[in-house]
Amino acid sequence: MIHSTAAEMATKLAAGEISSVELTQQHLDRISVVDGQVHAFLYVDTEGALSQAAAVDAKRVAGEKLSPLAGVPLALKDVLTQKGIPTTCGSKILEGWRPPYDSTIVSKLKSAGIVILGKTNMDEFAMGSSTENSAYGPSHNPWDLTRIPGGSGGGSAASLAAFEAPLAMGTDTGGSIRQPAAVTGTVGVKPTYGGVSRYGLVAFSSSLDQAGPCARTVLDAALLHEAIAGYDPRDSTSINAPVPAVVAAAKKLDVKGMKIGIVKELSGDGYQAGVRSRFDEAIEELVNAGAEIVEVSCPNFEYALAAYYLIAPSEASSNLARFDSMRYGIRVGDDGVRGAEEVMKMTREVGFGKEVKRRIILGTYALSSGYYDAYYGSAQKVRTLITQDFAAAFSKADVLVSPTCPTTAFKIGEKSDDPLAMYLNDIATIPVNMAGIGGMSLPVGLAPEDGLPVGFQIMSPAMKDDLMYQVGGTLEAALLRKWGSPILSNAPALGAN
Amino acid sequence: MALNYDQAIAAYDPTLGLEVHVELNTNSKMFCGCATEFGAEPNTQTCPVCLGLPGSLPAVNGKAIESSILIGLALNCSIAPFSRFARKNYFYPDMPKNFQTSQFDEPICVNGYLDVEIETDEGTKVFRIDIERVHMEEDTGKSLHVGGSTGRIHGAEYSLLDYNRAGIPLVEIVTKIIPNTGKYAPLVARAYVTELRDILRSLGVSDVKMEQGSLRCDANVSLAPAGSGQLGTRSETKNVNSLRSVERAVSGEIERQANRLQNGERIVQETRHFLEESGQTRPGRSKEQAEDYRYFPEPDLVPVAPDAAWIEELRATLPEKPSIRRKRLKIEWAVPDKEMASMVNAELLDTVEETVLLGSDPTKARSWWLGEISRLANEKEVAPTSLITPIQVAEVIALIASGELTDKLARQVVEGVINGEGTPQQVIDARGLKVVSDDSALMVAIEAAIASQPETAERIRGGNIPAAGALIGAVMKATGGQADAAKVRELLLKHLGQG
Amino acid sequence: MSAISRDEVAHLSRLARIEMTDSELDHLASELDLILGAVARVQEVAGADVPPTSHPLPLQNVFRPDVVTPSLTAAESLSGAPASAEQRFKVPQILGDAE
Ligand SMILES: [Zn+2]
């Protein structure tokens, strides 16, 4: 039943129609058949997954009260620590590292009885939009194996689209959940900053990073969202307030009277024709469902990309300083003669890939005395302006919408030599991270010109994540009625060789 | 010809700057729940946070914030209504994240002062030391260098790292430049660190043990031609681990710099290390190419914004300032300066005060603690307070005052307590040390003495009072020295019609 | 005129402790030049009247009680170490001074 939704699987598990061990085994089998083509996983924890599944089954047999997703398998992005399980962040520098602790997300997943299948591929330290920056080779888009599955969380999104897992965890610093969701025809949610604990999420850019759910439906994402969200005293930046009722919101299927704002600056030039037409059709569906459409302007969004490429590398240059071969990870050049400093330099030369080095150097520069005010300082001011733009827009609309990405999935290798072109992919997703608000991407059809999925982004105010689930759930239901079957039923079969 | 200290001071005016690092004595570390015990087995007080493991996040210890505010208040600082942690980025293996979580342009306390008293040629003089800032940060791990010949960093073949100390809360107290101390610069530096140590101890926020590194001083010294009013290039001397060393390091640097300048050499802005054995400093890293720390606000932590109510609540708990308390006690106890100083230096002022508060006479309390008890403590090479409690000492002093013990017996009681024989009363009972003051028991002994020396008794009856000595001696002998001789004399003379 | 010279990149790579070959330095210098040209746009709107935002949340005063919680065992702490000895992390000789 790997093609079912997580909610359906949960229902069958609860009814005793299938055991978690059986369900987990089906997914492990699928992984062994298709992952050679997709390369969504960096590590598959066959034994661990089956024993977690068996434990859930035993509890169910014993009549214990279980949480809604108990027994459903999940793919974990390799940027989240899981005790004893290799965690590489897609980097060679962490090859072989097995963390001695669980991230808060993993603790929550475990206590919810969600079965962790393994770790998914990603751009190194979440820097990228294609997984081409993974030290372990790129993942492939199940819609077209010659194309990228997005990034940085391309592995998680690809695992969903390839039916290797019904749920996955992602992290989103500038779009790393939403953009992969968009290009693989899946759903991805970046919750409000502080809504999900960052403890155990290997930091890329601390003030922007946010973990969130990846799934094939809005409801599945909501179920996972509620399992992982909530205040964590280990994360001083987590919000000490009740988690928005996103599952209930996803089930509302009603947007009558809601005001939906189209961000003028996130459409038009630079967006692929098929992306624009599918976006416009989705807007029509929302109008038909009773929503009121308004146009809002966020004039400072055009500076968001520039500010992001100063803030994120600056924080990254500091966050990644700890990878120095002294306490964990690989060590290069320790011949008993070289000093610690030289060994650090050699390890970091070998251990980090090109994009990571590029961003570390860029961030080091932006924070240098003499340049700080002009670069990092100015970028922080832009952040204020973007937040103000959002505040003004949310005074006119309940949620804001835009295409998730300017284009559908591009070819592997197409942009890997042009960092600036690559960075443009995130133009519509970055403002959400800058302001710390919520953002969701859900599929709204295939672009006529290439037959590839198009993502629709919904943005909700901070701590009102339920609003994007409400709109997303309604739109998804309307489109499903129109299409007759889920979008992924159009994806090519895999594993046939 | 080399300049000596007096010649150096005649030719140059020194300017000081002092940075003191204090390890707070919180139960847990600054950003994680690991214990802070000194001397634990290596790497047993470490966790993902203080090891800087990927994914870990800091969480601020609220007690450390309170302690920092208390320190700022005690140093007459303004407490910033908004302060932030910042990352100080530089690579060093004893620092697990390769940045130190510290404070940069938004420290928690600013603009304070501390007055210190110095004995000068013109009598006691007060120097006001302006405090620039008090900020919070975290300590580093400890490295052990193996191989090579000296055990120093250079020449080691490899290093071993223990991160138990990494993340212990540190408070750094930075003075503004301290001008116009002239030849008293070394004394002012020492007095400042001493006074600061006493304040920190009175606040109870740190163990302030320089020898264990919980209080560390870096001394900045620069010289300018006498009377020029200029500011010279400074050196920063680290590793100054005792009060005496603070004084020696400053005077040593003044001499070294003066001699360089005298020879037409320039002073290099650098870090120097104090060598305890020689009192000299050796050069460390040159700071001429200023390290670029790329400070930026710590994104994993939120601002610290203490409100006025919280600050006032903390202010209300401030203890009396040590300098004011010393003055008060000096007057209350009528103690000469020298005695006061010896109590302070022996770190027994608190103990003596506690004993006095239990009812003892200040002079007696002082002489017991600084005399007999300190002597025994010295023999055993332990702290006097580890041997006996103020309550026990006060009890002994009370027994002397009531005549139940003589000084001689009291010393035996104290010795017994220190030997672990129990409380003073238990020692008295077990050793049978009670002064014999029961009149009837004494009368038996007196009558026995008279019976054995009838002629002497007769001479006393006849008015020869000095003859009583022989009978008193006999009574004292018979009672094993436990009788009060004055009492024996009184009873004897009365009995023989001379009372 | 380029915004960043090869020497500057070399200095940055030293600061960041990343060994780089001459050709890497050249390549990165030209790339960074382009990127910096693009990101310098932030200065257009970063007026003196705009306050900086370092963090998306308006939180402050988040403190933890001063309570000791269990540490890792030394074996767990050292489990990822490339080398260890005497229950400590074993690292190449440390040259130069600490702070
Ligand atoms: Zn710790």
Image (cartoon, coloured by chain):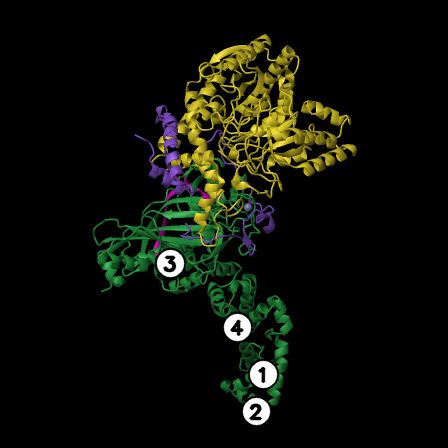
Q: Earlier in the sequence, mark 4 or mark 1?
A: 4
Q: Residue B160 at what x, y percent from top left?
A: 50, 54
Q: Which residue is mark 3?
A: B274
Disc assigned to residue B455:
2
Tell me the mark number nearer the camera, choosing from 2 and 3.
3
Front of the two marks 2 and 1: 1
Q: Are marks 4 and 1 in contact (CB under 8 Å)?
A: no
Is residue A65 covered in magenta?
no
Work out whether mark 2 precedes mark 1 in sequence or the reverse, and give the earlier one: 2
What secondary structure is found at the residue carrying circle 3? strand
Q: Under tag 2, what secondary structure?
A: helix
Chain shown yellow: that is A
Q: Residue under circle 4? A: B407
Which amino acid, mark 1? Answer: Lys
Kindly identify the amino acid type of the residue bearing the numbered disc 3: Phe
Q: Colour of chain C?
A: purple
What is the crowding at mark 2: few (fewer than 14 residues within 10 Å), some, or many (at least 20)?
A: few
